[in-house]
Structure formats: structure tokens, C-alpha cells
Image (cartoon, rainbow, N blue to C red):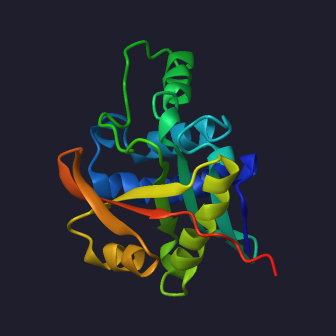
Amino acid sequence: MIRFAKKQDGAAVARLILVILKDMELDFLEEFGEENALNIIAACFTDPTYRFGYARGLVEEIDGKIAGAVFGYPASQEAIIDLPLQNYLRSQGIEEEINMFIDPEAFPNEWYLDSIEVDEDYRGQGIGSKLLTAVDRLATHEGETVIGLNVDKANPNAKRLYLRDGFEDVGEIMISGHQYDHMQREVKKRDRS
């Protein structure tokens, strides 16, 4: 069942997000370590404005377990999505500005699909496709009509999934030293019949 994320999903979602962060080889992980990164993500998850905040995501729940999650935000909010992380780090006595992400990712005038991940125990069951289809609910809720995302050029399987869902290449972008294709598609109208 795909549903809106809830505050209590933080620990389970943090484990999924960690997979993405490891693939991106972020300096943040090297500086804090995986266990601390999990705790930080779970703590910030309760802030609805955070990049990975519960209000920005949907989860697939199967038999009480979070099998997958998807998060995103309107491009117009990119400047504020990591402020909860800064606030949390300050609350822990870390005054220096430390960012998990240093590069802008969204293109103007889009709802940006930041992260999508399926738990390894549930891969190959179509959950990624279902979550990808469900992001239209989040984009529509934010009043957006275009969904954008970045796919690592080294991940052709993910790109095939996005192409099947109607995404098209609209540009390229460098994020954390990795080259990505930026793709977009229009929000799909839901059939109300």
C-alpha cells in the first residue's frame, strides 16, 4: 500500500536514504559515518520542510514494513530544504556549516523527485514503478505540473525505468562529482472514472 509518510517512519526511511547517499559517495557520510548519518536523517525526518521530511514523501508499506520510499520538493523550495539539517547539527553543538548536498539539483519550475529507493528485500516486484507513478500526487499537491529528476549516467537500469514512465532528457548536471542526465515529464492526469 502506497501512503503518505508518517513521522514514525523515520528510522526505516533513513535506512533507504542511506543506500542512496552511499551510492553518491557524499563527503557527509565520510565525515559523520553511517550510524550517525542514519540518526541525523531520522531526527530531521520529523521536520516537514526537510529534504527527506515526512511531508515530502510517500512510502510503500507491505506487512507493516517500509518496502520503498520516494521524496521530492518544488524547485522553488530548494533553498530551504536542508535548513532543518543545519538546525539539527547546531542543536548537537556543531556550529560550522556542514551540508549533506552542496550542488543544486532541481531545474526551475518543476517538482523535483529527489530520491526513490526500494528495500533490497522487495526489489524486482514493481515497487519502484508504483512509487514513480505515485509522485504525481505529491507534485499535484504542491501545484506543480512538471516532474524532474536526475539519473546517474552510470545507472542505465534506472534510466530505462524513467523512460518507460514518460521522462525525457532535458539536460545534464554534475552532482558531487558524478555526471547525471536531468529528465522531466508532465504530471499525469488521474483518471477519475
- Left or right of 5? Residue 97 is left
Residue 9 image offset from top left, x and y in percent: 69, 54
Foreground residue, 11 or 118?
118
Q: x, y (%) of residue 62?
A: 71, 77
Residue at 58 percent across and 62 percent down: it is 69
As displayed, is residue 77 above or below residue 157?
above
Kindly give the residue lying farthest to the bottom in the view shown.
Answer: 125
Residue at the image point whose x is 55% and y is 80% from the top: 122
Residue 7 coordinates in the image, percent (x, y):
73, 46
Pinpoint residue 157: horizontal percent, then vertical percent: 32, 79
Question: Which quadrant holds the C terminus?
Answer: bottom right
Quadrant of the drawing holding the N terminus? bottom right
Tell me if residue 101 can be seen.
Answer: yes
Q: In this view, does 163 lie above or below 187?
A: below
Query: Is residue 181 visible to us here?
Result: no
The one of 74 and 187 positioned closer to us in this rendering: 187
For the image, the number of numbered tags is 0
Residue at left offset 53%, top offset 78%: 129
Residue at point 19%, 52% (across, down): 178
Front residue of 192/179: it is 192
